Image (tube, coloured by chain):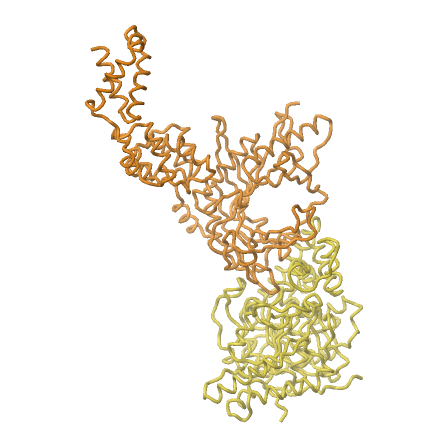
Amino acid sequence: MDYEIVIGLEIHTELKTHSKIFCGCSTKFGSEQNTNVCPVCLGLPGVLPVINEKVVEFAVRVGLALNCEILPFSKFDRKNYYYPDLPKNFQTSQYDLPIAVNGHLDIEVNGEKKRIGITRVHMEEDAGKLVHSGATITSSDSALVDYNRTGVPLLEIVSEPDMSSAEEARAYLEKVKAILEYLDVSDCKMEEGSLRCDANISLRPRGTTTLGTKAEMKNLNSFRSVQRGIEYEAMRQEEVLEEGGRVVQETRTWDEAKGISLSMRSKEQANDYRYLPEPDLVPIIVDPATVEEIRLNLPELPDARKQRLMDGYGLSEYDAAVITTSKAMADYFDQSVGCNADAKTVANWLMGEVSKHLNNEGISILECPVAPKQLADLIALIEKGTISNKIAKAVFEDMWTSRKDAEVIVKEKGLVQISDSSEVIGIVDAVIAANPQSVADFNAGKDKAIGFLVGQIMKQTKGRANPDMVNSLLRERLQG
Amino acid sequence: MELFKYTAHQLHEKLVSKEVSAVELTKSVLARVDAVEKDVQSYITQTRESALKQAEAVDAKIGQGQTISTLAGIPGALKDNMCTQGTKTTCASKILANFVPPYNATVVEKLMAEDTVVIGKANMDEFAMGGSTENSGFFPSRNPWDLATVPGGSSGGSAAAVAAGEAIWALGSDTGGSIRQPAAYCGLVGMKPTYGRVSRYGLVAYASSLDQIGPITRDVTDCAHVLNVICGHDAKDSTSINTGVPDYTKSLVNDIKGLKIGLPREYFASGMDPEVERAINKAIEQLVSLGAEYKEISMPHTEYALSAYYMIAPAEASSNLARYDGVSFGQRVEGTDIVDMYKKTRSAFLGAEVKRRIMLGTYALSAGYHDAYYVKALQVRTLVKKDFDKAFHDVDVIITPTAPTTAFKLGEKTNDPLAMYLQDVCTIPVNLAGVPAVSIPCGFAGGMPIGLQIIAKPLGEETLIRTAYTFEQNNDYHKGFAPLLEVK
């Protein structure tokens, strides 16, 4: 049978507020264990939470950017379950009245646009981190708890089951990540856990509308895992169905190393969270004027920025999309163009040399050793004819390691392009004299032969001769 | 001079006039503790050294001619569910037998700022669940009026300490009557302020939406003085009310002319001790003779309040008490794995009543029962609150007995939780509605004190003080000191 995959994503993102959601402790990642803690986030007897207003503001910002309705009256609830990383043995979260509901997001996969519904966005506190004594959970006889992360603010963004392929899920996740970055509310580092994703996956015969039994996939810690995990799970469920079996409602965990998913717990073993309204917090009343003010102050979002790059600089939709997927890349682009560099050239450099070098070193553009202005200056040297494109690549290579300005490198290494014909005419003549066969070929109508001659001249000038000038000098001499 | 028998405001005069020193006063109270504590058992932890140091500091201030606040140097007791930095805070639970908080409750900070002296942490029903202190995980306290009877609860240790002269004043907490009922049983003034009037930060939660800290004192004047110190907004408690605090001593006025009293017929139902009823009726007649008017009113949802309370409070408790798991503080019993450790720890160190309420609350919140029990109880709570709103359209105060009977004998109700719960039938609706109420002495039955409950609308503490003060000034009930009878 032909099955349709039905996917909904639950994305958790840590908000980059300075302090935690219910106390004044720092949210800094990587601090010494159990140093960013106080009686409140440790859940000691008698403590009370106080909402960090910045968290509400960030949540409204995200809700608006995801085209949600902001509920004027929302509240916190307790989600009760026992786990040692949860000091109160309940998580303060939002249950029936989340801060934002009924949003949507447009994605594009293989040129096809699709609208993904967003059910809700809610605020909650993060849990601590277990540090096991052994190499793996099963081989450990004890665990220690680091409560630094306890109480770091989280947003959970729940989508409708509107995605029907792993590619769509990935595109949706990438889009959400881009928006969160543009809003400057989260670091969105999947490797540090500041962006996490669970996927609800089910299958149904294509053409039908009833949802099949779903499995919830956890531990999808990278974009690659999201895609592979979903593909695997869809395949697994299809096999089960094809063999006449039934998909069991359960939570599964993705093992990226082995490329398989494993059952964690069945529906019967699932927690009954016994939600109750958080009595220690008052309801969150967001007045419409505040919402409008936040809406007015929303930064430019990926779609708008992409359009601006297309309309304002004539970039292709593809180029604009690639550059705007990462806010940092788009910022780099804008800064470089702001230094009077040609937009299309900057785009080409970003998608070419810059991306290549970043990927090779596995670093983000924020860590790029060549500053936007330095790239703009390099491009200016090409446009002025001071150096050729080819030399420019070598200069860029040098800039990457030495961090020097292009002009300094060009001067130090004497890489200034030779555009004065009198400086190369001797070499041109010598090359013509030394390569009679090529000259003959050219004269016989093989235009390509001139390429070889140009190459010889470039070699002798160590690439510094202006190739256009060399070309026209050669033609003058040969045809003259 | 038996200094321990005086009220705080009387002792303040003695300190200011240098008739006695704060150290003498504290020593007098400590000597009284030495004499009667073995019988009364008010305290879980005594803080004698720090009490004397606090007293010395007050004497130094007086010596330098500094003005001191009314409660400065006056020895008091704190219910052991208020966190005290560096001093054990157990909630009378074995699971917190070794718990020393690294921080102070807001009320403790406020009392320290006033240079009060704290004699110790008072006994209570474990996690404030109970009405007799018999549910203490350590030992029961006894009523100084008759050592064979309970002092009430859950703030029984606080009330017993004040009644026995082991403290001049005390703080209790009241979730369903836990200040007012022990105050009534021990012949004291006990007020539960409006929900949110006193910060709960540092009060170990039983049922967060109902818990409120309040004073237990020997007279209404002391009640006003303690309120002046502990009330007020606290940025650490989101549910605390952000309005100014009046000077409650300004309401110590002997005049209730024109006061409209409501008598809800549902509170004078069956089960009430006839002597208690007689005393209440006599008190009402007296208030009328002092210029008040009264009318009978109806609060039709009263009969459902107890049931709603025993869904809502345990539901919140089941969540609030989940943190006592042996992981990062408190006592632990090791287990084969984490779940086994949880089970063994909680089985070993939580008492029967606490377990009963955790189970009750867990059940009420469980999938499939949540709407039928918990949500229904919340709806009843709204109706009970509406009863009060409606009543306060017509009357200034509502008067009822604090408890249907006087203090009962130790062990009398321990095997019958429902009978124990019924002692709170008059006090519980007040917590559900979040309104303030005070219990004041209004007579005796068989030698045991009877409490009169006066209820006002939200933030009506001034009306309560004025009404209670007027009644008190026209009677002598508060002047009798507990005889500390021998066990019969």
Q: In the rendered view, does A468 fall on the left or right side of B8?
A: left
List x then y, in percent, for residue B264.
65, 70
| Residue found at x 26% / y 18% | A471
Q: Nearer the viewer, residue A479 or A83?
A: A479
| For residue A259, side relative to residue B114 (left or right) | right
User: Which quadrant of the view contains residue A417?
Assistant: top left
Placement of the N terminus of chain B among the 4 image quadrants: bottom right
- Of residue B440 and residue B229, the one placed in the foreground of this image is B229
View extreme (top): residue: A444
Q: Nearer the viewer, residue B143 or B32?
A: B32
Determine the colour of chain B: yellow
The foreground one among B423 and A346 is A346
Residue located at (64% from left, 35% from top): A258
Image chain in orange: A
Q: Residue at x 24, y 18 (%)?
A: A428
**Which quadrant of the figure has residue B11?**
bottom right
Q: Position of residue A136 (x, y in %)?
A: 66, 45
The answer to whether residue A268 is left or right of residue A61 is right
